[in-house]
Image (tube, grey):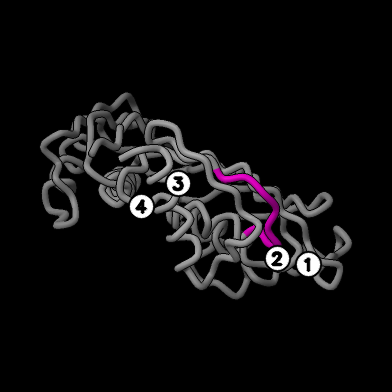
Amino acid sequence: MTNNELQGWVRDELFWDPKVDSAPIAVSANGGEVTLRGTVGSFRQKREAQKAAERVYGVTSVKNRLDVRILDEYGRQDADLRGAVLQAMALDGLIPKTIDARADDGLVTLTGTAAWQYQREEAEFVVGNVPGVVDVDDQIILINAEAKAGDVKQAIEQALQRDAKLDAEGLRVNTRGSMVMLSGAVGSWGEHDAAVAAAWAAPGVTAVEDRIVVEY
């Protein structure tokens, strides 16, 4: 596939996704690496555009350089935005009360602690959907129950083998304390995301180093 063909496929996918306003987004491709540029109206639009690009066959990585410019009707003072963010998190039962937030000119910084990565991801997702947010900086610290490195490695390898969406033959799992390193190659971004999610789901994991390569 040529760079021009890949650019066309990504543009088509952005246009196809009803959650994305593709008109202001410029796409360039170079050897499987796709770059998105332009200005969108919300942080969610920026996030959904990247997901759409990653779905396209032939894409090996995405550089998301989209800017977020909030329309005047959704602009908020820092105090008001922080209040809206805290309220949104309080209404979500998956987000622990130990997570806090502060707002600075549309940038929301998440702080505090959580026991699981899915709780951090849920907080990021919910906050990113709040009108007026232009970016999310996740500084939440994971405090998880300790587990033996050998047990973690075995549990992750078994989880990778069980996942029907994933061919785990090309993946390697290494552990050092509570940190997991994933390496090897997969055939799509869907497989990549499934492998990373499996690693984060293991008890005791507080960091995942992602060295997985997407190959077609």
> What is the span of residues highlighted in magenta in the rendered image?
36-43
Disc 2 packing (10 Å; few <14; some 14–19; many ≥20)? some
- Disc 2 is placed on an element classified as helix
Name the disc covering residue 83, or none: 1
Could you give the CA–CA distance between mark 2 and mark 4, rounded to whole angstroms?
35 Å
Marks 2 and 3 in Cβ contact (< 8 Å): no
Judged by depth in the image, the label closer to the viewer, 1 or 3, is 3
Residue 163 drawn above or below residue 148 = below
Asked if residue 66 is among those painted magenta in the image, a careful observer would answer no
Q: At 23% from the left edge and 39% from the top edge, which residue is drawn?
A: 216
Name the disc covering residue 56, or none: 4
Q: At 25% from the left edge and 48% from the top edge, which residue is drawn?
A: 191
Residue 103 drawn above or below residue 91 = above
Pick the residue in front: 204 or 156. 156
Q: Pick whichever of labels 2 and 3 is earlier in the sequence.
A: 3
**Residue 105 in picture, x, y percent from top left:** 84, 51
**Amino acid type of the residue tagged 3 in the rendering:** Gln
**Amino acid type of the residue tagged 4 in the rendering:** Val
Could you give the CA–CA distance between mark 1 and mark 3, rounded to whole angstroms?
40 Å
Marks 2 and 1 in Cβ contact (< 8 Å): yes
Residue 86 visible in the displayed image = yes
Identify the residue under disc 2.
86
Judged by depth in the image, the label closer to the viewer, 2 or 4, is 4
Asked if residue 42 is among those painted magenta in the image, a careful observer would answer yes
**Amino acid type of the residue tagged 2 in the rendering:** Leu
**Residue 158 in picture, x, y percent from top left:** 13, 45
**Residue 48 in picture, x, y percent from top left:** 52, 60
Left or right of 110, for residue 171? left
